[in-house]
Amino acid sequence: MDRRKKEISRRGVLLAAGAAIALTALAQPAQAVTITRKVSPGPEEPGRRADLAEQAIVQRHVRTLWGQPQMRLGTLVWPGSLLDQSFARWCYWWQAHLLDCAVDAAYRARTPERIDRVVAIARGIRTRNLTGWTNRYYDDMSWLVLALERADRLLGVRFGDAVGELRAGLIEGWNPDVGAVPWRSGDEYYNTPAIGPTGIAMARLGELSRAGQLADFLHTRLRDTASGLVLDGVHEPGGRVERTVHTYCQGVTIGLETELALRTGESHHRRRVADLVAAAGDRLTDAGVIVAASGDDSGLFMGILARYLAEAALSLGDTTAANIVHASAQAAWKHRAEVDGLPLFGVDWTRPVTVPAHPETFPQFTHSSAASSANLSSDLSVQLSGWMLLEADHQLIAAGR
């Protein structure tokens, strides 16, 4: 499964409101900005670092949707042409994580501006999705319901029956013969990226039986006994397993088992968390820093692992999980580049961000397999991953972990 192609190409449809902007944009030249390698330490306080990561994404990526000031989304790349800013291309699940990070920031330091941003992004997602809150991808819907549930629970911000509609959409995809949900409606591929966040959502919404079945599916069908890591997915019928390892597969499984450990009190869920955290620490870190697990393991993947490692540390006191988050946050910050005083994170937190040969310009991003690591750093998903990591680090420090 080429996840990156799915991210960029899904639902490339424009409403009439955006069409005029998109046609105008075809003639627009590429933008150029100043980018430098940053070697000074910057602020030491984790909350301040998270604040700067937030500011970077808000300034570079967040735009109004089709001229509607009460609706916003994140452009997929930066710098972006007017075509990018018209949201001719968009990615539902990236926007769901943008919303989730906006919730993190508002929970860290509540302000009217941050609450308004949460509301505007959620409204933007619903409008740009064209068909309401739901779509045919169960991973997408689960990410959005998690963000919306947290907005309600942590901030008191509710969007009608959005959570209920998404919950119903996830349950509709349940296959009782398999005991799981597929990647998308009508598909026969049952993968961790869909099953894991769906399970977390089910647990938080009171569907503990379904959440438990999903956790057992991952543990019995997709855990590699040799490495202890969770594999990508399985094709049913037939049982052919896709053995690719991704960081975010470990993250969502840790998140699901953590929820069940908290809500059921059953010790085997806590053991599974500890075992998977240890396996991830052994095989998916370099000097304690999260690293990509495979060639297409980038963007949001590592940030998702960091988010749920922090959940395990906060909820279950897992010190190994906390140490990985802290080490990763320090490394990502140390190796950042800087544009106009704001951070730019790389796809590899263990290495300095690659600056173009002519650092006075940062080329407009093109989605090609030959794209350089410098160009990939302009991807919204990569920057969200860094922001998510720094918010997780702040939460742990604030809780004394």
Image (cartoon, rainbow, N blue to C red):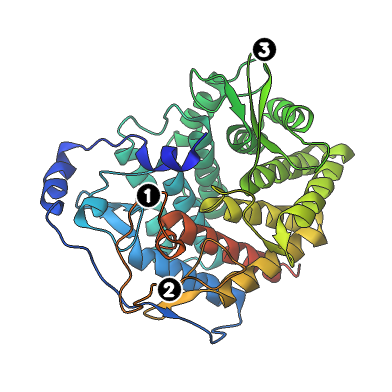
Circle 3 sits on which residue? 177
- Element on which disc 1 rests: loop
Q: Which of marks 3 and 2 is in front?
A: 2
Q: Residue at x 36, y 78 (%)?
A: 359
Hey, what amino acid is under mark 3?
Answer: Asp
Q: Which of marks 3 and 1 is in front?
A: 1
Name the kind of residue labelled 1 in the image. Answer: Ser
Q: Is residue 303 left or right of residue 254?
A: left
N-terminal label among 3 and 1:
3
Using the image, determine if residue 174 lies above or below residue 13: above
Is residue 76 in sight in this rendering? yes
317 and 247: which is toward the camera: 247
**Position in image of residue 289 (x %, y %):** 69, 64
Q: Is mark 3 on a helix, strand or loop?
A: loop
Residue at which label 2 appears: 355
Asked if 123 appears above or below 42 in the picture, the reply is above
Q: Where is residue 110 in the image (x, y as percent from the top left)?
A: 49, 65
Residue at 72% in and 45% down:
254
Query: How far apart are the two marked residues, 3 and 2, measured between alpha carbons?
Result: 51 Å
Q: For the residues marked 1 and 2, what is the alpha-carbon distance in whole angstroms?
A: 18 Å
The quadrant of the image that shows the C terminus is bottom right
CA–CA distance in space, label 3 to label 1: 39 Å
Which percent across, then down, holds residue 95? 42, 48
Q: Do the residues labelled 3 and 1 touch (CB within 8 Å)?
A: no
- Kind of element beneath mark 2: loop
Which residue is the site of mark 1?
A: 368
